[in-house]
Image (cartoon, rainbow, N blue to C red):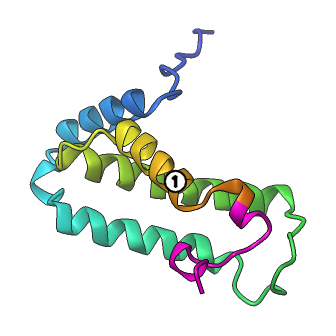
Amino acid sequence: MSAAITPPALDSLLAIRDRLRTFADERDWNQFHAPKNLAMALIVEAAEVVEHFQWQEPFRDPELPPDKRAAIGAELADVLFYLVRLADRLDIDLGAAAADKLAANAARYPAERVRGSARKYDEYDR
C-alpha cells in the first residue's frame, strides 16, 4: 500500500494564489481568466452561496446539517478562489487591500458611535 500524498496547506492567500496560478497554467486557462470573466464567475458563485439560504426565515441563524454545511463550504471556496484569482490577474495585493479597507471602515464606523446599529456611515449625522 502506498502512502497518500498530502497537498501543501492552503493556509494563506499567497498559497492559494500560487496554487490557483499553477492550476490555471497546467490547464492553459489563463486565456479565459480575463478580469471581466473572473468577476462574473465570482458573482455566479456568490449567488450559489445565497441559494442555500433562500426562503429561510430572516434574522435566524440556521442549524445546518453536515451535508448542507459541506455544500456551502464548497461554494464559499469557489467564491474565494475566484476572488483571489481576480486579484492576482489585476495585480492587487488582496491582503494589503483588506487591511486598508478594514482601517477605512474603522474610521467610518467608530465602535463607540455605531455599536448595535446597522446604518450606513453617511446616515449617522442625520
Highlighted range, magenta: 113-126
Looking at the rendering, which quadrant does residue 114 occupy?
bottom right
Which of the 4 quarters of the picture holds residue 53? bottom right
Quadrant showing the C terminus: bottom right
Residue at the disc numbered 1: 107
Is residue 111 or residue 126 the one in the foreground?
Answer: 126
In the picture as drawn, the residue positioned furthest to the top comes out as: 2
Please identify the quadrant where the N terminus is shown.
top right
How would you rate the neighbour count of disc 1 (Cα within 10 Å): few for under 14, some for 14-19, many for 20 or more? few
Q: Position of residue 20 (x, y in %)?
A: 32, 39
Quarter occupied by residue 52:
bottom right
Q: Residue at x 81, y 85 (%)?
A: 58
- 63 inside magenta stretch: no
Q: Nearer the viewer, residue 40 or 118?
A: 118
Residue farthest toward the right in the current orientation of the protein:
63
Residue 123 part of the magenta-drawn span? yes
State the count of labels.
1
Horizontal side of residue 107 vs 126, given as left or right = left
Q: Which residue is at the far bottom?
A: 55
Three-letter amino acid code of the residue under disc 1 = Ala
Q: Residue furthest front?
A: 125
Q: Which residue is depicted at the point 56% across and 51% down? A: 106
Which residue is at a point 70% across and 55% down the rendered structure image? 111
The residue nearer to you, when weighing 98 against 14, is 98
Q: Answer with left or right where residue 10 lies relative to residue 31.
A: right
Vertical arrangement, residue 87 with respect to residue 96, above or below: below
Image position of 30 (left or right of 23)? left
Q: Residue at x 38, y 65 (%)?
A: 42
Q: Position of residue 61 (x, y in %)?
A: 86, 69
Residue 69: image x %, image y %? 75, 58
